[in-house]
Amino acid sequence: MRVIVTEDYEQMSKRSANIVAAQVFIKPDSVLGLATGSTVLGLYNELIKMYKEKDLDFKETKTFNLDEYIGLSKDNPNSYYFYMMNNFFKFINIDESNINIPDGKALDIKKECEEYERKIKEENGIDLQILGIGRNGHIGFNEPDVKFEATTHKVSLDEKTVKDNSRFFSDINKVPRYAISMGIKTIMLTKKIILLANGKEKAKAINKAINGPITPDTPASILQLHQDVTFIIDREASYYLDK
Ligand code: F6R
């Protein structure tokens, strides 16, 4: 495990964008695993800049998103499909047929999860996975639990997550309580992982993930066992690391 501590959010975004860009340069048909949320917005903006400056080409790149809310349609501004389109995909030259996001409106959620796993396998797995982290240590929507959920599955969102994510909704009661998420095994099978975090509110989760026991109560702690993971965090998120 490597830990890169940057001065601020901007540097965190630039460092991680350079890693994603290098991946796409070296292997233009890379399979990227993508996250949503506030942390990764700066990274997407940096990648869009590189694309506009003609330093990057996403024509052959394939993507799999970590998660999606159950019950929200693609055109719902709170769906992760909408987020990805409006914060990243519509600004780059990715082929729409190479974009994969779980369908939160699927009639058969179990089948949708199995199908998602099958598609990832068909692409020979994910080359580079981008992760954020929840204040409760979640990755994707793998919430603190008594066991690690292996593959893509339906999750019931933790109260802390519902509260955190309610900032994007007009009313906390509108936050979906369920989501589809890649599982821990799906994430652990990715070839390379970068986890981004910024701000003091993530500092405890970061410390537990890096220095704590490996436990499903802090899902990100499993990353200690991954062969190629880099945490790229700003100084505030590193607050407890050397305490
Ligand atoms: C979203 C996801 C989540 C977020 C995490 C951090 O696709 O997988 O694990 O990465 O909740 O969210 P922000 O960045 O909004 O603090």
Image (cartoon, grey):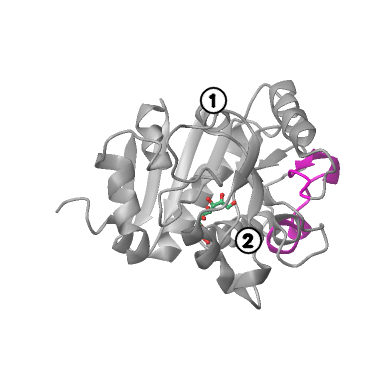
Marks 2 and 1, the one that precedes in the sequence:
2
User: Looking at this view, is 87 or 60 the one in front?
Assistant: 87
Q: Position of residue 229 (x, y in %)?
A: 41, 35
As drawn, is 23 to the left or to the right of 224? Answer: right
Q: Which mark is residue 49?
A: 2
Q: Which of 19/1 is in front?
A: 1
Tell me the amino acid under the disc marked 2. Answer: Lys
Query: Distance of mark 2 from mark 1, alpha carbons?
Result: 30 Å
State the residue position of label 1: 189
Using the image as rendered, state which of residue 145 and residue 226 is in the foreground. Answer: 145
Label 2, secondary structure: give it.
Answer: helix
Q: Residue type at mark 1: give it.
A: Leu
Q: Quadrant of the N terminus?
A: top left
Mark 1 Cβ and ligand 1 under 8 Å apart:
no
Work out whether residue 127 or residue 142 is closer to the camera in this orientation and state it: 142
- Give the residue displayed 39% in from the left and 49% down from the top: 232
Circle nearer the viewer, 2 or 1 = 1
Quadrant of the rendering where the C terminus is positioned: bottom left
Residue stretch in magenta: 84-104
- Residue 109 appears at what percent x and percent y? 76, 39
Asked if the magenta segment contains residue 193, the reply would be no
Q: Residue at x 50, y 28 (%)?
A: 188
Relative to residue 213, is residue 37 depicted above or below?
below
Q: Quadrant of residue 228?
A: top left
Considering the numbered disc 1 on the image, is that residue within a helix, a strand or a loop?
loop
Residue under the point 41% across and 53% down: 136
Q: Residues within 10 Å of mark 2 (few under 14, many from 20)?
A: some
